Amino acid sequence: MHFRDPVPDVPAIYLCQPTDKNIARIGEDLQNGLYGSYYFNFISPISRQKLEDLASLAIQSNAVTQIIKVVDQYINFISLENEMFMLKKGEKQDKDSLTESKQDVLDASYYSLNRSESTDSDMEAILSQVVDGLFAVCVTLGTVPIIRCPKGNAAEAIAKKLDTKLRDNLKDTRNSLFLSDGGMQVNKSSCIHLKFLMIISFFFKIC
């Protein structure tokens, strides 16, 4: 962002990824007292550590009472049409902290999943990114899908991780994104209408 003049009587609505860079920039805005109140909407869920970092910045800036809402929006995917979407690309790091070849690994693409240079930690990060995107789609649709996939490849790993993530969320009845009313959440009867989710690899053929 470029330099902005303070507008102390205006509420500010932020929509951004919960990256270290964005959290630091939010801290600068709080320190400079740019706005009268703040509504922070994060595209993907903010981690507990970054939430604590944000809280510390707010305390240091004496701006705790000005923060009205902090919301996880679960919209880290891109809708191309009514019935078509793609997962958002991963956040690339600065070249100083990441080599050129390593930057490509952060994208959840077929190339990244199959490149010979990918380490186990790289693969785990990519799979988690895909799962988070698919979970966001499920939350937006307000449905828990029946998941099917072929065995023995990345599709199976993604399906298992997504299934675990959905089950864990459903177990927490107080904070479940699928069993509570309000916002993007839906009521219990809505989950009866289950959808079918097939996760397949690039080489899989449907006969």
Image: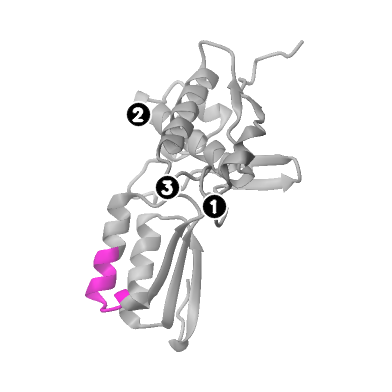
Q: Name the residue under label 3.
A: 175
Q: Name the N-terminal-most of marks 3 and 1.
A: 3
Residue at the image point whose x is 43% and y is 74% from the top: 38
Dot 2 and dot 3 residues touching (CB under 8 Å): no
Between label 2 and label 3, give the one nearer the viewer.
3
Residue 18 placement (x, y as % from top left): 41, 55
Magenta residues (range): 55-64
Please say which color scheme the image uses: one colour
Residue type beneath disc 2: Ser
Q: Residues within 10 Å of mark 3 (few under 14, many from 20)?
A: few
Between 85 and 148, which is closer to the camera in this rendering? 148
User: Mark number for residue 156?
Assistant: none
Q: Name the N-terminal-most of marks 2 and 1.
A: 2
Residue 60 in magenta?
Answer: yes
Q: State how far apart marks 3 and 1 are (Cα).
A: 10 Å
Q: Name the residue under label 1.
A: 181
Q: What element carries label 2?
A: helix
Residue 51 is drawn in which quadrant? bottom left
